[in-house]
Image (cartoon, rainbow, N blue to C red):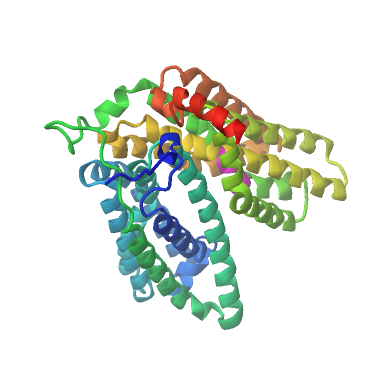
């Protein structure tokens, strides 16, 4: 059944079948994530009764195991389809959080945490694959932007919700929070189940079967270059949560409350104007490589601003204004880069092996997240401006790599819609 309807389908902007259910499910699951991620150590300590040391050790080990599972999740997507695997992962997460309050012993907690971590770590791969499965053309960019905005809004709402619950009922409410998470994931799965994938664009006796395994990914040098460029940008995505608080407290000796203000501003902008910014970029007709490169350049500008700011060290009032301006520039970089970069990776992946390709691509985020704490702290120990200099160079390198890769990537990946269709649509838009 056709997913795109009418004239809008020619521009790639039509709604996909079940899109509202998909986005509502993503928003609900994001609320569940926001209810435990900011308090993860405390959350699991109170839910299971185990010590912080044991909880931290189990979370680290299971998190690493989850990374190792990502390639298998990619293979499962190629074999069974992203929608089916997505529903299975929602079910595993719902079951895991339902069982956490009963996992009071170390073996029980480790078992539940391992199964849940496998689903959590693989979820980004499967969700990206699902966007590729249900949307084509510029609709992918729009779904990327909507998804990110809902995730930010949902996580913020979840954190506020659990803070209110804890203020009223104390830490004993963590048990009910775990069951609320379980319900959120179950409901999200039911909603996502209403989405209808786009019919596959392949035919013949091999339809439905991957043409090759990870060897095909490893031979695709342009896609590996795209993954490497994303690793450089992904280091920047870790800056606000890992480097920024340390930089404020050690190098600038600024109040910790500024960290909260920066996070609040970033979350509010992502949730409030993320779709608007992505829409303006999409309607400009910019190639995905170039808009992603622009996002990386905005990152570089924000990081260079931190170097200047860390050198001048103005007074307290100027500190607040300068840091908030830098956070705004950083957030704009995130809003410009994320939809284009995500849609670029999805569209550059051959459909029969999209899951494997995106599992490889998502490892760039996971490796950057794992490396960031040790890298940033080591550089910060030398000079507070040094990690920002490294991040500036990394962002500039990512932008240059994206531009150089443009002619080597598939045309349908670089362009949100065919150039001829975009040119034909532009006069009509201008006349309107």
Q: Quadrant of residue 71?
A: top left
Q: Residue at x 43, y 44 (%)?
A: 14
Q: Residue at x 20, y 34 (%)?
A: 210
34, 198: nearer the viewer: 198
Residue 31 visible in the picture: yes
Q: Position of residue 135 (x, y in %)?
A: 38, 42
Residue ranking furthest to the left: 205
Q: Position of residue 75 (x, y in %)?
A: 25, 41
In the image, taking residue 138 as reference, residue 123 lies left or right, namely left
Q: Position of residue 100 (x, y in %)?
A: 37, 71
Magenta portion: prevailing SS class: helix
Residue ranking furthest to the front: 431
86, 243: nearer the viewer: 86
Residue 335 visible in the picture: no
Q: Residue at x 26, y 53 (%)?
A: 84
Q: Residue at x 51, y 24 (%)?
A: 423
Q: Is residue 109 above or below residue 293?
A: below
107, 44: nearer the viewer: 44
Q: Quadrant of residue 280?
A: top right
Image quadrant where one finds the C terminus: top right
Please tell me how many numbered marks the rendered image carries.
0
52, 176: nearer the viewer: 176
Residue stretch in magenta: 235-241
Is 240 included in the stretch rendered in magenta? yes
Is 324 included in the stretch rendered in magenta? no
Q: Position of residue 384 (x, y in %)?
A: 71, 38
């Amino acid at each position: 059944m056709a997913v795109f309807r009418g004239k809008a389908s020619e521009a790639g902007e039509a709604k996909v079948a079940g899109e509202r259910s998909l986005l509502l499910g993503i928003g609900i699951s994001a609320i569940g994530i926001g209810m435990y991620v900011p308090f993860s150590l405390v959350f699991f300590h109170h839910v299971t009764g185990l010590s912080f040391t044991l909880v931290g050790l189990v979370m680290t080990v299971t998190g690493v195991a989850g990374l190792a599972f990502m390639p298998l999740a990619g293979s499962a997507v190629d074999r069974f389809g992203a929608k089916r695997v997505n529903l299975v992962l929602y079910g595993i997460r719902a079951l895991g959080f339902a069982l956490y309050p009963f996992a009071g012993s170390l073996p029980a907690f480790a078992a539940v945490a391992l199964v849940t971590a496998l689903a959590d770590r693989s979820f980004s791969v499967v969700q990206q694959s699902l966007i590729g499965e249900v949307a084509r053309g510029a609709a992918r960019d729009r779904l990327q932007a909507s998804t990110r905005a809902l995730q930010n809004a949902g996580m913020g709402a979840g954190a506020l919700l659990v803070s209110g619950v804890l203020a009223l009922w104390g830490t004993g409410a963590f048990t009910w929070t775990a069951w609320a998470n379980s319900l959120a994931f179950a409901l999200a799965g039911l909603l996502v189940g209403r989405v209808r994938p786009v019919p596959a664009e392949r035919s013949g006796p091999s339809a439905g079967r991957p043409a090759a395994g990870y060897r095909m990914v490893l031979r695709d040098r342009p896609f590996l270059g795209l993954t490497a460029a994303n690793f450089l940008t992904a280091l920047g995505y870790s800056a606000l949560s890992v480097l920024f608080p340390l930089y404020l407290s050690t190098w600038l000796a600024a109040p910790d409350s500024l960290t909260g203000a920066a996070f609040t501003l970033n979350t509010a902008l992502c949730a409030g104007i993320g779709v608007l910014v992505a829409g303006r970029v999409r309607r400009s007709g910019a190639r995905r490589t170039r808009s992603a490169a622009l996002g990386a350049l905005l990152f570089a500008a924000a990081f260079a601003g931190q170097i200047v700011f860390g050198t001048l060290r103005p007074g307290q009032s100027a500190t607040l204004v300068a840091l908030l301006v830098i956070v705004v520039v950083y957030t704009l970089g995130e809003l410009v880069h994320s939809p284009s970069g995500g849609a670029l990776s999805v569209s550059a992946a051959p459909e029969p092996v999209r899951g494997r390709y995106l599992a490889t691509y998502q490892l760039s985020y996971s490796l950057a997240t794992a490396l960031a704490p040790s890298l940033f702290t080591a550089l910060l120990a030398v000079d507070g401006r040094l990690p920002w200099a490294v991040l500036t160079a990394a962002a500039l390198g990512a932008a240059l790599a994206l531009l150089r890769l443009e002619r080597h990537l598939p045309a349908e990946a670089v362009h949100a819609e065919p150039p001829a269709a975009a040119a034909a649509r532009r006069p009509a838009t201008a006349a309107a």
